[in-house]
Image (cartoon, rainbow, N blue to C red):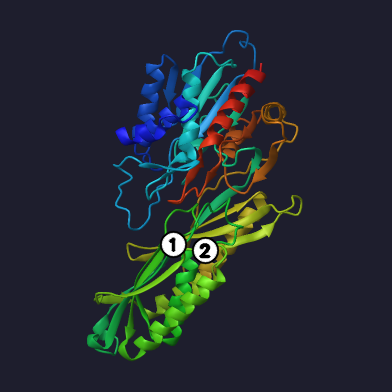
Amino acid sequence: MKQQKDIMKGLKPERVWHWFGEIMQIPRPSKHEERISKWLVQWGKDHGLETQSDRLGNVLIRKPATKGYEKSPGVCLQAHMDMVCEKNSDKVFDFMKDAIQPVLDGEWLTADGTTLGADDGIGVATILAILEDKKIQHPALEALITVDEETGLTGAGGLSKSWLKSEVLLNFDDEDEGEYCIGCAGGIDTVAEMDYKLEKIENIKLKIKDWKAFRVKVSGLVGGHSGDDIHRGRANANKLLNRILWEGTYKHGMRLATIDGGNLRNAIAREAEALVVVPEEKVRAFKTMVTKMGKAMVFEFRSTEPDMEFELRDAEMPKKVVDAATQERLVNLVYACAHGVLAMSREIENFVETSTNLASIKMVDGAIRIATSQRSSVESAKLAAAAKLEATFRLAGCRVKHSDGYPGWTPNPESRVLKVGVAVYKKLYGKEPVVRAIHAGLECGLIGEKYPQMDMISYGPTLRGVHSPDERIEIKTVEMFWNQTVEILKALK
């Protein structure tokens, strides 16, 4: 804790960084927000503010208007309390117990081998700093801090339609300083399960001594957000590993024992590995193939994946492998499974309309589970993308389930709060901010569905590498974000 305070010391605005430091001490994985939710409730009560929580753990803190703002439309400050929990494979860290370890890196703050949690801990910290500040002029405030934004938006999705009183919402979950977001994509998850059987090695014609076991691993990929970064040409570790497994299956008699690739539904897979066995007489050719394909893929993605690595190492011989029929269906399915941009917008230049992410491949309870997520700013295209994935999975004999999904947020270029924000930004920084919609999902879509008359914008400081251990926040933009928020609240009189 002392080291963390030393790192945060001197950063501006002081109270925002103070509360961010406090939040980093509290474990808060998605779907496990009990501790941070209780902490926020106690924080509100300790500061003498009306504070509530709902059955999901969402927290609502109210602060009365300052003098002269009593008749102004109320403003909701909104952020989410959960964080994406990703770490480097060699980092020993328990997200259910350990505090995030911040690292100062020049003009940026990052973490030691894990996600930082600035998405959206910095939004929460900013809200707390506003609520405790007695000098800021503002209308009546409602601070809505939601659970489980990262793995399903269930906090915002479960909001009561009568909880909020505000007419304006400022969402603090954007990742580029100097822009205002006024629309976002809707999304849906599509998950397939393929049952498998295990076969004993000694029953596969050859004797156990005639097989050689290897671990094949793809690592060092950039990864990133499956919405914001899907168009950047980054590699997907599941796809790259499968190219090797497909060649091994059809040309080298390779058999698959285990596979584990990717992690979260909204993150592009950074790492994937498999335990395989190869007939002794094919070992040399198999090694040559892996080396050759690895070099080819490193060259193929040389401009977007500078740290990509392929590893082939000896492994302990497994007792069993996946049955041959399932293995063949799997490697063909993963090759055929769509990943990346499916359509660009016809109305907005260089804007992704529809995409899909091959998020993870896991072996769970006798089945191989493949998790994907689809996004689109057009509802019918979102559903068509999910159907496309379902059709692919069904052709491979999988069981398929879809999540309930979440709606997009339709842009309103005539928004009053947007005009106020643009005017404030020009006054503070002497230039026009960027106004855009994003391909990622935001809670604004779900909140807007429940409160259709609410006027909303989303903005924030600059974050990079979100949803990966490379996550970092540009320090100077936090103060810029703070200053414009204070001025927007003042201007909403």
Contact between marks 2 and 1 (CB within 8 A): the answer is: yes
Q: Residue 28 at what x, y percent from top left?
A: 37, 39
Q: Please, is residue 274 above or below residue 134 in the view? A: below
Instruction: Tell me residue 38's x, y (percent).
Output: 35, 28
Q: From the viewer's side, name the closer residue of 37 and 225.
A: 225
Residue at 62%, 49% in the rendered image? 439
Q: Residue at x 47, y 49 (%)?
A: 467
Q: Quadrant of residue 20?
A: top left
Residue placed most toward the observer, 25 or 250:
25
Residue at 57% over, 54% down: 229
In this picture, is 390 found above or below 64?
below
Q: Is residue 315 above or below residue 10?
A: below
Look at label 2 and name its amino acid: Glu
- Dot 1: what SS? loop
Mark sitting on residue 220: 1
Q: In this figure, which residue is indicated by the disc labeled 2?
A: 305
- In which image quadrant can residue 73 be found? top right
